[in-house]
Every structure is written in structure tokens, then in C-alpha cells.
Image (cartoon, rainbow, N blue to C red):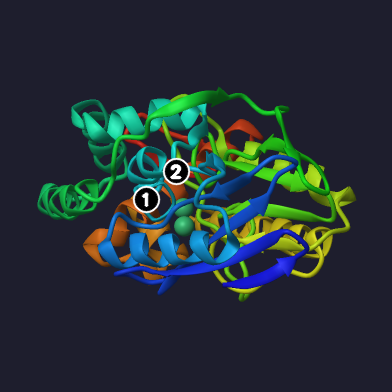
Amino acid sequence: MTEVAPGVLRIDLPLPFAPAQVNVYLVKLAEGWMLVDTGMDSDRSAALLDAALAEAGATGSLRWIVITHCHPDHQALAGVLSERYGARVAMHREEVRALDQILHWETRLQWQEEALRDAGVEPRMIRRVNASFAIVQRTFRPVPVAWVLSGGETFDGAAGPLTVEWTGGHAPGHILLRGPGFVLAGDAILGNGVQPSVTWYPEADPLRDYVAALDRMRDARLPAFCGHGETVPDVPVWAELARKRIFAKEDQMAALLENSPLPLREVAEQVWPERLAPFDYRFAILEARAYAERLQRTGRIRRDSQNRYSISR
Ligand SMILES: [Zn+2]
Ligand SMILES: [Zn+2]
């Protein structure tokens, strides 16, 4: 456990996949404590959290558990901890919906499969992606949400208010907390030079949402405490770099489509070559789709009747 700011304690929890750990934060409130994110549902994570809460003197006064987004490394212990410590759980409404889809995944599978098919992914690969998604799906847990957030809510921190800010992008209802002198960023801002993935979902433009969130961060001359990796010292500097990386990827995609129309699969495999293993493959396709959606909406590319993309002339 590390004190990253007065009344803000970082607890590093292990993960069974890369990145090797997730950071969760114990924050002192005007009355009691708040935990931001929870780690995976494992005995080891639960034991580390119990020990950290005891060390901080928070076992009898954990009031809130705030979930930045419903990926299993952030949400899976919320139910256990809420019951054990009597804390109430807060999560954004879009994550309530997304989690419901994942837990009852027939709907989710349908649109995910459709997105893969539209991208030109072979049926055999779709089956492999589904099989690996089934393994990941088992690590999600229901979250007993007491406060459904929309953005703009505040928590009464010991040193000042912590305001909920919706970022979208990485997950439909991803939020961060803007606190007194720091940002608790979840996976919206990551340490160690890592760019958060952006994932498409139906009828959405998550890349637009995320770029807008990065724009709003321009005035936050604060450090960010991240869901993974080391503290980011200056949010606007990081946000500017993240924007540049996004625009560079857009240009890379547009350049690929310069000469002949391509299915999204080919674009994804060239722009996200590090994500071609089955468990990662859907992220490559859904991120490529988020970019394609953005480029289409801004008129740079178009999609033909065979779902191939080309430059708009
Ligand atoms: Zn995440
Ligand atoms: Zn994460």
C-alpha cells in the first residue's frame, strides 16, 4: 500500500493476465472511506484488500465502492466487499447495462459476432474468439449497485469534493473521479506509456466520446492515479499525447484504404498487429470498428455494400 496523496492509498493487486496488476485506491472521505475499483475475484486479492483496509483503519467505515468500469479486474470483488464491509456500490448506468449484457451474454454475443462477420472474420476464427470470450466471461461478477451514476455526482472527500466525470471510450460507461489535487482515472488514463483501448458497441461513437473526454482534461493540471501502471504526473500532457496517437492511427487507417477497398479485418490486422491472438482479437476488431465509425462519421472513409472500407473522394 502506498500513499500517493494525502488520504489516497494505492493498493496493487495481482492479475492472471497482462498487465500483471491493477491499482485500486482507498480514499478518505469527510466521513469514512471510499474504495475505487476492486480487482479480480480471487482469494489473494480479497486478502490483500482486507489487510489494506485494516492497516488504514477503514474496516468499520468503508462507505462507498466506486467502479470506474465493469471490466473484471475492476469490478469483480464489489459484491463480496460490499457484503463484508457494508459499503454501497456506485457505477455508471451504461456499465450497469454493459455488465448485464455480459452476464446474460446472448445479446452481447449476437452483436459482437455480427461485428466480426461484418469485418470479414472467418467463421472458424469467430468460434475461437467466442470460446476465449466464454472463459473471460466467467470472471465477471454481478455488482449490487446502490447508486447508478450518470456523471456530475460528487463524493464528499476529506480534502474536498470528488466529482464523477463520464469518459466513455474504453468502456461505454467509464468514469473518472476528479478530486482535490488529483484525478482517479481508472483505465481512461494509463501509466507506463500505455494507450487505453477503445471498444466499439452498437449505435455508438466511442472514439468521439473519448476524444471529447481528453479535451475536457486539458485544464486538469493534476496527476492521474491510474488503473494500471505508474502515476501520470500531468494529465493535460498525457491527454495531448493520447490525442496525437489517436489521430496518427486514423491517418494510418486512411492511408491503408488509399488504393483499394478493404474489409475491416485486414485493416485491424495491420493497425493492431499485437492483438491477433484469439483472446485479444475481438479488441482489435472492435477498436478498428470504433475508428472506422469515427472516420465514416467525419466523412473521411466510406463503407460499401460488401462492408469494405475505402477513402471518400
Ligand atoms: Zn478496462
Ligand atoms: Zn483495467
In the rendered image, which quarter contains the N terminus? Answer: bottom right
- Residue type, numbered disc 1: Ile
> In the image, is residue 187 above or below residue 109?
below
Q: Quadrant of residue 301?
A: top right
Q: Is residue 269 left or right of residue 139?
A: right
Q: Please rate how many residues cluster around mark 1, counting C-alpha atoms within 10 Å: few if below 14, some from 14 to 19, many from 20.
A: many
- Return the x and y of residue 196 as percentages of the image width and height: 55, 58
Could you tell me how many numbered marks the image carries?
2
Mark 2 residue element: helix
Can the viewer see residue 125 in this picture?
yes
Q: Residue at x 24, y 34 (%)?
A: 103
Q: Please rate how many residues cluster around mark 2, counting C-alpha atoms within 10 Å: few if below 14, some from 14 to 19, many from 20.
A: many
> In the image, is residue 23 above or below residue 111?
below
Residue with the mark numbered 2: 289
- Return the x and y of residue 144 as percentages of the image width and height: 38, 30
Q: Residue at x 55, y 49 (%)?
A: 35
Can the viewer see residue 313 in this picture?
no
Given contact means CB atoms under 8 Å apart, are the residues at marks 2 and 1 in contact? yes
Residue with the mark numbered 1: 285
- Return the x and y of residue 63 as percentages of the image width and height: 56, 38
Closest to the observer: 180 or 302? 180
Q: Residue at x 26, y 46 (%)?
A: 120
